[in-house]
Image (spheres, rainbow, N blue to C red):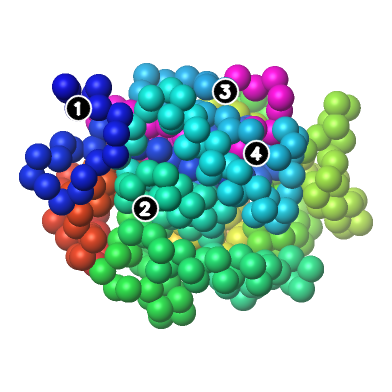
Amino acid sequence: MSHYEYVGPSVFGYETDQPVTRAAMISLHTSPIEPIGHRDAGGMNVYIRSLALQLARQGLQIDIFTRRVDPDTPEIVNVAPGVNVIHITAGPTEHIHKNELFPLVPQFAEQMALFALRTQRRYDVLHAHYWLSGWAAHLLQRYWHIPHLLMFHTTAHQKNRVANEPDRETDLRLATERSLIELADGIVAASPDERQDLLSLMRSPVDKICAVPPGVDLSFFHAGDPAIARVTLGLDPDARYVLAVGRIDPIKGFDTLLDAIATVPSAHLLLVGGDLADDGTPVGALAGLAAQAATQGINDRVTFLGSQPHDWLATAYQAADVVVVPSRYESFGLVAIEAMASGTPVVASNVGGLRYTVETGHSGYLIPHSDPVVLADALNRLLTDDALRARLSEGAIRSAQRFSWESVGTQIAHLYDRLIAGTHEELCAGANVGPAKLTMLA
């Protein structure tokens, strides 16, 4: 019987075991095919989908499990050869705030197991994204005796360091994340900063956390002619555009960005993320930012674009003069890398993974978070100095080459192989990182 025909549990640690061929990813609270900036869809969604596509190009079969929020969504959506999104019914088939989803995790895990049994699919490894998915992966191990790799993307205690009281994460999340540190077989940190945080503050075992950066599709995000990009998007060819992209969440710092824009009269802000009504009026959390812009008298210089497809973003990066990532915390900052690959200088908060991607004076500027005065000064400098922008643009393109998905996918596949071989000690050792010379930290 061939490896592909066998659907029973693996036996780990034997030389007869085959390399990983099928992985189950879990993104319980948000779908990787959700429009970016819509509800909880942000950099994590892009990361999961892009990683799955890269692993499929390397020969793996990837099924991504997410909770069904629309009764009309097909159970299986084929994204590309080798990549499927599986919609699991757990609780009402409608959007539920992520803080209310934990009681549905056991049902989600059970339905995942039943799906695999019904469709006769065997998985070699579980790769969970975010704490809710991590708990689902833990519960699934009672059905599937396979290793569990976890990436938090953000952690509650890091968010709580910078969050206002109403936006603080729950004690349940804090406790669950601490438990998952022990329960997961391996953990992926998006940056050395996150890895050190997990080691020192969460006291995670040193040999199970690997620092693997996010990736960027360099064939998709690349420099182009800004004039052509502006014509494509219907933008003013002579305006100075500042672009910001992300979920509408206080931790993203968009309120600080609006404060800065109010003192930079040459800047026109394009804000991508959040929800718009049918008539284009901002609704939900985005309405609060629109009200702030109105109070500051800058409505005519701020365009709220709502969520946009990924291919639109590729053109928007090329059209912008500057991309701003004003987050109070950011585990890796995928927007910054995409913008850099597109040849656009980045002004970003000096927090989390951003400090390992943006280089001050080379690809943009790192500045303190929540400081509109310093942010406005950086924007003024860039928007008024064409030679400076051109120099930083060239540096940004060079910097982004370090983060190709080919290299990142190779590292993640290496972790899969070591886990299914039963190697849990020194998990990060021996990665073949390829031409980007990325470092796996043990």
Sequence-first tag of 3 and 4: 3
Residue ranking furthest to the left: 15
Asked whether 205 or 271 is in front, the reply is 205
Q: Residue 102's x, y, as percent?
A: 65, 54
CA–CA distance in space, label 1 to label 2: 22 Å
Sequence-first tag of 4 and 1: 1
Sequence-first tag of 3 and 1: 1
Sequence-first tag of 2 and 3: 3
Sequence-first tag of 1 and 2: 1
Is residue 58 in view? yes
Q: Are circles 2 and 3 on residues that touch, CB within 8 Å?
A: no
Quadrant of res 207 = bottom left
Badge 2, how many Cα within 10 Å: few under 14, some, many 20+?
A: many
Q: Which residue is mark 2?
A: 149
Q: Which residue is mark 3?
A: 75
The dot on residue 3 is 1
Quadrant of res 374 = bottom right
Q: Amino acid at mark 2?
A: Leu
Q: Amino acid at mark 4?
A: Ala
Give left or right: position of 98 versus 204.
right
Q: Amino acid at mark 3?
A: Glu
